[in-house]
Image (cartoon, coloured by chain):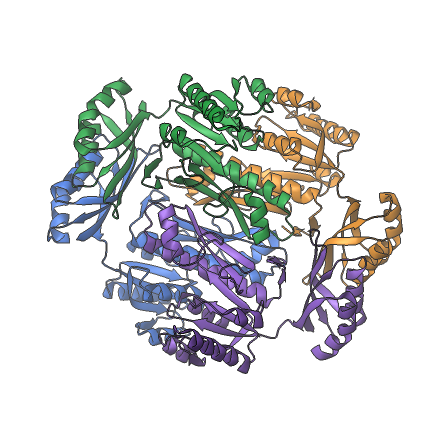
Chain colours: A blue, B green, C orange, D purple
Amino acid sequence: MHSFLMTLDCPDGVGLLARITDFVASQGGSFTEVNQFTDKISNWFLARFAFEMERETSLAEIRNAFVPVARELNASWSFREATKPVRTVLLVSKEDHCLADLLWRWRSGELNIEIPLVISNHTDLRSVLEKEGIPFMHIPIPQEESAKENAFRQVSDAVCEVSGELTVLCRYMQILPDWYCAEHHNRIINIHHSLLPAFAGADPYKRAYDRGVKLIGATCHYATGELDAGPIIHQEVLDVEHFHTPVDLRRIGRDCERLALARGVRLHVEDRVVVHQSRAIVFGN
Amino acid sequence: MHSFLMTLDCPDGVGLLARITDFVASQGGSFTEVNQFTDKISNWFLARFAFEMERETSLAEIRNAFVPVARELNASWSFREATKPVRTVLLVSKEDHCLADLLWRWRSGELNIEIPLVISNHTDLRSVLEKEGIPFMHIPIPQEESAKENAFRQVSDAVCEVSGELTVLCRYMQILPDWYCAEHHNRIINIHHSLLPAFAGADPYKRAYDRGVKLIGATCHYATGELDAGPIIHQEVLDVEHFHTPVDLRRIGRDCERLALARGVRLHVEDRVVVHQSRAIVFGN
Amino acid sequence: MHSFLMTLDCPDGVGLLARITDFVASQGGSFTEVNQFTDKISNWFLARFAFEMERETSLAEIRNAFVPVARELNASWSFREATKPVRTVLLVSKEDHCLADLLWRWRSGELNIEIPLVISNHTDLRSVLEKEGIPFMHIPIPQEESAKENAFRQVSDAVCEVSGELTVLCRYMQILPDWYCAEHHNRIINIHHSLLPAFAGADPYKRAYDRGVKLIGATCHYATGELDAGPIIHQEVLDVEHFHTPVDLRRIGRDCERLALARGVRLHVEDRVVVHQSRAIVFGN
Amino acid sequence: MHSFLMTLDCPDGVGLLARITDFVASQGGSFTEVNQFTDKISNWFLARFAFEMERETSLAEIRNAFVPVARELNASWSFREATKPVRTVLLVSKEDHCLADLLWRWRSGELNIEIPLVISNHTDLRSVLEKEGIPFMHIPIPQEESAKENAFRQVSDAVCEVSGELTVLCRYMQILPDWYCAEHHNRIINIHHSLLPAFAGADPYKRAYDRGVKLIGATCHYATGELDAGPIIHQEVLDVEHFHTPVDLRRIGRDCERLALARGVRLHVEDRVVVHQSRAIVFGN
């Protein structure tokens, strides 16, 4: 059995779903999970299709056959084999909790990714990755503007070199330049340690403590040119008690971050996320 | 615009979704939300379709046109107008918290039901319903077996008389006979005050207290012949602290019950629930 | 048995708890629940004491006996009979979901309050309250500044006239003047329909929808002169799915609001909240 | 500053708290967090005290001074330095998710434990522990009854040899004999992969799937002679969707298990748990 995942979005109209499902049936595909949703405000059709085929076939063959259909529908679409791991590059700084969690999930096989490379602006985590046998690249990010640009160009090149399909910022603590976010549009996942849009920016736990909130959380989102404003994929929340210090909030927050990031990466890797305007449509949360 | 809801389940195969979506397109229908899922263990196709039509049409017309398709697929299916309120009969006993909550949601228009009748084995809540202008029927349930059967026959007749499409047990505290559950199969919603299968049966809060659980909950499910064993539609959970007495658990539990019941009824009324074997498939929770 | 509740906060030091518990023991009091917490950042002692006495005694007698102790500790404190209902005035506008919920909880006896008066700037909810036998007062809030001031003076006077100990804003939709908040300091509970500080101000659900958040919530807090910035007592959160419209968010939000407000009012009424600087310390959440 | 933690439970009476807090004050101790609770059903006094002392003092000195007070109150009590790590022995089998999580928390310093030894009935995880520099002991558990007894005697001896104060079963998959649970009473923490009492015993996820539950969870509890019946310390819960297979439930369950176990161990290590009869009183959840 060969399993495929397709996502698609296009202007709405009558017969779209029939057109697509008919195509899949004509290829001998049998659906295992389908989600379709029409955004009535913008009149936009969004869908995700999981299907299986018994016959020997290639991704390229089906893709080529679908091209005219997609053109006809004026659609953006993605199409891939469900079981093929997503090549994922991790960007880290000094903190290791998100990294350690993703590594554990990758190692145990629960997350369908492969990790060809980890890049860091520091060297603290080099040994962790060497133990795992994962290539580690140290690209320092200087303060000075043009040197910084240059460094990010190196990062981008390194991601491309290893055919990275997804970049995950595991508490990378650097603001990516606009051009970088544009080049890797909806393929950079970031984790912010607050329930965005609350406490966007720096030091959210300290500010959460001062404000006396009773809940803290974390937000997994796609990085865009505007800081902490990209489409939200997933959010996690945990209770806070009066005896928790800012240090405790940081600790509780780490649990939120790990869960939200792992969940967000999984949703992306299962192609359950379709971005429409500023919102991430998540099929089958 | 006319909005319709269809649910369908049948043996799996290639081309099913194309067949159905093609039918809807041929009628001029435009999908707003579609969910399909194949249970791989039993090889079963389950789906929900929400679609809209611009042209003037009748439910009966589309229904008749679909009959041959459904026969071809060997499918169980339901089909109805999305905006038409579901005629819902409530069965109550003495406690009013679930009743009061459903009444509020009905009155405010947030739940798409109409309530042609409330039946109780007691008269305590009669005045509440008279204030709302809802017909109230008192049908006592005697202990003696054949008199009891007779009473439930009256209940069933009364539900049919008002064309009840759904019966909701709002803490009715009576066990319905097998034949009753069979006659109203998957159209009787019950609320149990525990996270089933924990604490099935009587007095769950007392037992939860004694067991020292840190979470209590409520389970909204379809009533079947076997007590507290019907397909689960929705479950809610809340924290318990050490200083909570069994009385507190009952109070906290009431919040769980109200939320779980309201959510379960909404899911049913929006036709998001398709029962397959002993499990309720809930589309778009 | 007579049950009492005491809360107290003062500068920290050695022997404070011994001093207070010794006082209670000397009066023949037996503790049922005690919570103490020292804020190490500001070096502040905060505590709540629940205790019982067998002997016939008066609140005034114990209070008078405690006055010198409190002075010695330089403490703010409250002291009252646990079973005596808190006289609670509700301020409402046109929406009734928070009102209906509090009324149900009051009527069922689960919330230890009495409601001597409901005040509204509109007349829409008059009949609801007349049915309940609760006095209703219509005090319109004009736009013009000095007339508005005057209206709020009337509201404040009406609350005092019925010896209101607590005011609950049940979606009152008016911003109380600074002097009002100061006069009723930490005795006005408000509900905001977002997870503050996210979406403070108007129309939070619309903004939450546009931002594509995956969680929405509600915040119960004390009203202060600064809008939506008062100490947070409790927050509730619920999941949002991609198919939820802004109308759905409002509906889901109402459930959050009701739960958060009921929980917040209960925590206040059980004297579990002690405000320190801008944070509400909640004992035994 | 020296920080201490004391827990205590005894028959209720007037003046108990004054007696204890007076003792602490007389030693120059200043409370940072106190929780007291009286179980009115069994008339039992339970409390936890966190306090600090400026003067140079020894644990033994204070402990000795408190002995006569405890005797006077007929109390069970514990007393220790707050910052001293709890010596924790982990028992593992083949699965590493709970182990990996506890190791990460220990390594990062967020959990106040030291791990002098890990014991397993298999050798699969030996290399993981060697990498961490933690002693690993392989004690196979034979099927035959007397050989099994003997093996558990070896386990118990090994724990005592390294002065283990706490044993954590990280998915150990073995039922400890009664005498073992009795010897290490309330000092063995286990994690069960269901919301006990639901699905006690083997294969809970498979049964949860078949039952179609909408929530799954995990329960952290003290191991007692009766399987899965010990006092519950903490429970975690996560949502389940219709498209989740039993394999998915296992994966989601692992997140529950890790969180529940880490939280339960933390609560124990902070001495926030006092067991009374069959219930675990958790102060300051």
- Classify residue D56 as left or right of residue B62: right
How many badges with numbers are in the image?
Answer: 0
- Between A256 and D164, the one nearer to me in the picture: D164
Task: Please determine whether, in this image, residue B236 is positioned above or below residue B88.
Answer: below
Residue B193, position in %: x, y? 52, 41
Task: Please determine whether, in this image, residue B112 is positioned above or below residue D225.
Answer: above
Could you tell me which quadrant the C terminus of chain B lies in? top left
Residue B98, position in %: x, y? 53, 32
- Classify residue D155 as left or right of residue A115: right
The residue most toward the bottom is: D161
Residue for point 57% across, 37% down: C258
Residue for point 26% across, 48% down: B41
- Between C225 and D99, the one nearer to me in the picture: D99
Q: Could you say which quadrant of the image residue A48 lies in? A: top left
Residue for point 75% across, 43% down: C82
Could you tell me which quadrant the N terminus of chain B lies in? top left
